[in-house]
Amino acid sequence: MVGFSTAARRSLNRQSRAFACAAAVCLSCFFGQSPGAQTPEDGLQSGPWVVAPYFAANYQFNDNVLLRNEQSAQSDRVRDSVLGVVSTLYFRNSNLQLSYEGNRKVYETRGLNDALSHDFDAEVNLRFGNGTQLQIAERYSRGNSDVERIDDSGERTFDGERFDVNTWELDFSREVPKMRGFRVNLSGNRLRNRGDDVPFFDYDRLEGLGEYREPVGPRMWLTATFESRRSDHLDPATGNRFREERRDAARVGFRGLNRGGQPFFLSVGAERFSFEGRDPTEYSGLSMLAQWIVPLGRYSQIRLLASRRALPSFFGTYYLVHDVDVGFDRTLFRRSRTGISARFSRNRYGDPVDLDGDGIAEDFRRQDSFKSAETFLEFKPSPRIGFRVGLRYRRRDSNYANADYENMVFTTSVLLGWPR
């Protein structure tokens, strides 16, 4: 990963995307369909393919649609229609999956430049006899406005502008009980904002991960992990690169599988983060990732996620994110389920930031705290028809001017077909 030039990274992006598409087509033609038909739960049989269409109609009331402070908050009612299809070809314990989803959002008060977004996915999953798996995926999202897709830490809030994201991924892994395992992952990501005046940056990103797993029990491994990331940050208005992001992390920990086959892990180590070019900065410190999923009988489970990481900021520095996410899901009856989740996050910026936009950083370090809670109830009177209601609350408190907000969203949904 270290030492790739910008041109080399872009060339590798193009070659890997072409390889992913070619591999998917060649493998589907070579292997054909495996014996044994799929059940109706998977979708509709159409020759060698299993096709699963779905539709969702959502209506929500949002009391702060742009996530602004109390003085600038605007409420709105949003009609959201989702139409998609997933086509899967099964062959020799593997599969090829192609999917499309179109999403149309209509804001009754505040119009958007483009209310229609598209998601295209192509993915091939190969499972070999010795327990190894190979996944090749290409994902393209055009015209989306859900900023949580590109900034889950919450620095960027909804601004009404659209963006395009292109992602490719190669993942090769082995996880067999009582045996040594590994994981190697290489991925690329390209973000382009539609608007010129957007409080974020475009980027071209290349990431790599290598992990070794040493067995210490029937379903438990000790792990050693190394990650590396290189990103070119681009000005949305001009497309020119203004800085390069470098991040390397090394961690050790453990990984296991619970009774339901779901993974749990803890990985702790050190990371180094730096910017080169405009606004140079550097950070070295603790890196941590953790996940724990606890089944409670046949119908319930508790989920715990925690992390500490350094992320690039729009303000020309980095910020440390301390994140904890807790969730609970339960199946109430045969065709209904409910859940509740809560998230707590704290962001601390590493360098002073420019408060008045004059290009000079004042002696001020921004700090944000983020809280959210969500609950839902879903009922399916038949396998292909469902109804869902949900309530989500979010709040951010900050010592940076006008960065506070509070938000409540109530959503009702009708689900048809085989929703993802």
Image: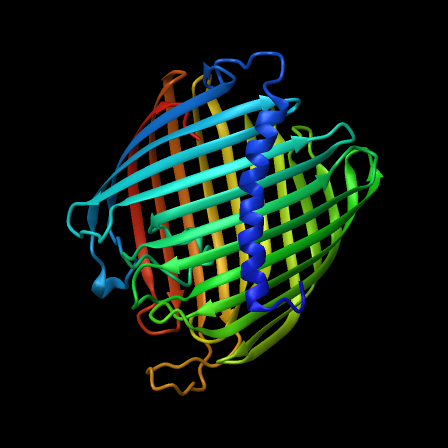
Residue 175, image x, y percentages: 74, 37
Query: In this view of the protein, can residue 311 be seen by the observer?
Result: no
Q: Residue visible at 30% across and 70% down?
A: 402
Q: Residue furthest left?
A: 109
183 sits to left or right of 326: right
Residue 244, image x, y percentages: 54, 72
Residue 203, image x, y percentages: 46, 63
58 sits to left or right of 223: left
Tell me which corner region of the image, top left, top right, bottom left or bottom right, holds residue 171: top right
Q: Nearer the viewer, residue 234 or 63?
A: 234
Q: Residue visible at 35% across and 55% down?
A: 163
Q: Nearer the viewer, residue 100 or 364?
A: 100
Tell me which corner region of the image, top left, top right, bottom left or bottom right, holds residue 60: top left
Q: Nearer the viewer, residue 225 or 289?
A: 225
124 sits to left or right of 101: right
Residue 206, image x, y percentages: 57, 59
354 sits to left or right of 347: left
Q: Residue visible at 58% across and 52% down?
A: 187
